[in-house]
Amino acid sequence: MLHSSNWAPGLSPEEMQRAREGTCEKLVEAGGFVCRKGESVDCWLGVVDGLAKMSSDWVTGKTASFTRIASGGWFGEGSILKNEPRRYDVIALRDTRVACMRRDTFMWLLDNSIGFNRFIITLLNERLGQFIGMIESERLLDTDSRVARSVAGLFHPVLYPGTDRYLAISQEEIGLLAGVSRQRVNRSLKVLEDAGFITIEYGGVTVLDLDGLRNFAG
């Protein structure tokens, strides 16, 4: 998984060896926590195989769902750099193998590898763009467009390189990403299906026209 990661081509053989030595793997069963909000950050995490959801539960009982992380996706670099407790939960949606790169290995690569440094800068920039886009969607777009952008946002070559065209995702989860009710998501998905962008299937959706979703304006 390390050799196939987006950041691997920028590493020298010595740097890759350091990355291998400082990384272990764990299996998280479906429904289990990959990491929890409030815990100390001792590693950078990547999904080797499986699917996980990043979210945050509030004392009011509300849940904010940020994104889903498929095979090849790495996360947690912001918490490492700020040296603060995690601000979200990551839950395995199915049995998921997770790579855990130790914090000291991550910091060594950041200090010594230009290629790794550039990847982290790109990763942070892409994350910033993603969240600016989420704010823009919430404030400027109608509901159908917000649902379309929320689904399209799960297909990102840098942040989520392993996402399949079939998304095993519930309408409730799409609603949490878009900030709308499950019932309203159902109506929006039918609009998008009628437009030829997706097909609605049991337990998820298949994306037929990703560019159409990204540019949809209801």
Image (tube, grey):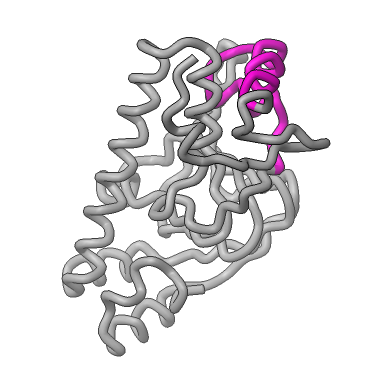
Let me know if residue 190 is in the magenta part.
yes
Q: Position of residue 88 (x, y in %)?
A: 48, 35
Q: Nearer the viewer, residue 156 or 112?
A: 156
What residue is drawn where x is 61% and y is 53%? 164
Q: Position of residue 160 (x, y in %)?
A: 48, 51
Q: Depth check: 115 or 16 in front?
A: 115
- Asked whether 136 falls inside the magenta stretch, the response is no
- Residue 14, located in which quarter of the rendered image? bottom left
Residue drawn 73% across the image and 51% down it? 94
Question: What residue appears at the point 42 percent right and 82 percent down from the top-left corner?
Answer: 21
- Work out whether 75 lies above or below 195: below
| Image mark count | 0
Magenta span of residues? 168-192
Q: In the drawing, does residue 81 fall left or right of residue 159?
A: left
Does residue 69 sit above or below 202 in this rendering? below
Percent of width and height locating residue 83: 29, 47
Furthest residue toward bottom: 13
The kind of secondary structure the magenta stretch mainly shows is helix
Q: Is residue 49 above or below residue 85?
A: below
Q: Residue furthest front?
A: 195
The residue under the point 33% across, 70% down is 105
Point out residue 191 in the picture as x, y percentages from the top left corner. Answer: 64, 19
